[in-house]
Amino acid sequence: MKHIFVVNPKAGKTDRVAQITEELEVYKDKIDYEIYVTKSIGDAREYVKAYLSSHPKDVIYRFYACGGDGTLHDVVNGAAGFENAEVACYASGSGNDFVKNFPDKERFKSLDCLINGKSQKIDLLKVDDKYCINIFNYGFDGEVTFGMLRFKRWPLVSGPMAYNLAAITSLLFKMNQYLKITVDNEVIFDGKGLLVAVANGNCYGGGFHCAPEAKIDDGLIDLCLVKKVSRFKAAGLIKIYKAGEHIHNPKLKDLIDYRRCQHVIVESHKPVAYAIDGEVFRKQRVVIDMIKSALNFVVPA
């Protein structure tokens, strides 16, 4: 097996390149490895895809996404479709929400646990032409993610703090908008709504459990739609939503639509902000499909 450490030098608050290089010194006679330092957003995706396309297919290549959810997103998009590729997440970013799908997320901060870990098949979402390992969020949440990226650049602001600041700002300026949601070829909503989260994992935004019952290997999309809500009610909803208590709260039954499916189309009258694993875009219509057992993901020892 070949181990390739894809390091994002801008993930988190410190440059991890020197740290990871030093940590790997103890493994120089134990494993075959190399380090690649990313140069820009999307560079990891192109590097991993090019590497796999140009190297022998009878060797297993384990790519370690050393950074946050954005780095993991890029590595996954490079590795998806290659049966001889495995993806590990060395959690060293400001968020790392995807690893919260596992009971002991601290093991994702241990190189030893990751190097000795085993891969298992997990699902992915296909969002138009991109893969999503965790969550696609459209509408209010998309605007929050745009804002979060801005606040994360502030000194002393953590990932969860940046999300909270962005949520408050969006409550004041970016609220309900027209949404048309089609699920498994049936229109389930056509009107003003706050947000829709289409999930493979259960948590995003530094700890918001939008899809608390989602599993990364059940072959199902978990969809959570929050319908039109006032600013006053939305402010009170945030705490419930973060805790993942919204889907079984009887007081919210007319506000929340939570279901499982295989295929989703999200549309609006104009381009709307959305995020895929924290990477932000704007588009008017997005198509999401479940791709079962699409990735070999490394679970730490």
Image (tube, rainbow, N blue to C red):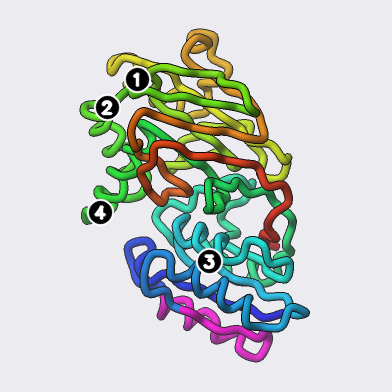
Q: Earlier in the sequence, mark 3 or mark 2?
A: 3
Which structural element holds mark 1? helix
Q: Is residue 299 visible?
A: no
Q: CA distance from mark 3 to mark 4?
A: 24 Å
Q: Which mark is residue 65?
A: 3
The type of residue carrying mark 1 is: Ala
Residue 252 at x, y percent in the picture: 49, 12
Comparing 80 with 247, the one in front is: 80
Q: CA distance from mark 3 to mark 2?
A: 33 Å
Would residue 71 appear left or right of 170 to someone viewing this image? right
Q: Quadrant of the N terminus?
A: bottom right
Q: Which residue is mark 4?
A: 156
Comparing 205 with 175, the one in front is: 175
- Residue range highlighted in magenta: 17-36
Q: Which residue is mark 1?
A: 234
Residue 264 at x, y percent in the picture: 58, 33
Classify residue 165 by image quadrant: top left
The type of residue carrying mark 2 is: Leu
Which structural element holds mark 3? strand
Mark in the foreground, 3 or 4 = 3
Q: Is residue 251 a member of the stretch shown in magenta?
A: no
Mark in the foreground, 4 or 1 = 1
Q: Are marks 2 and 1 in contact (CB under 8 Å)?
A: yes
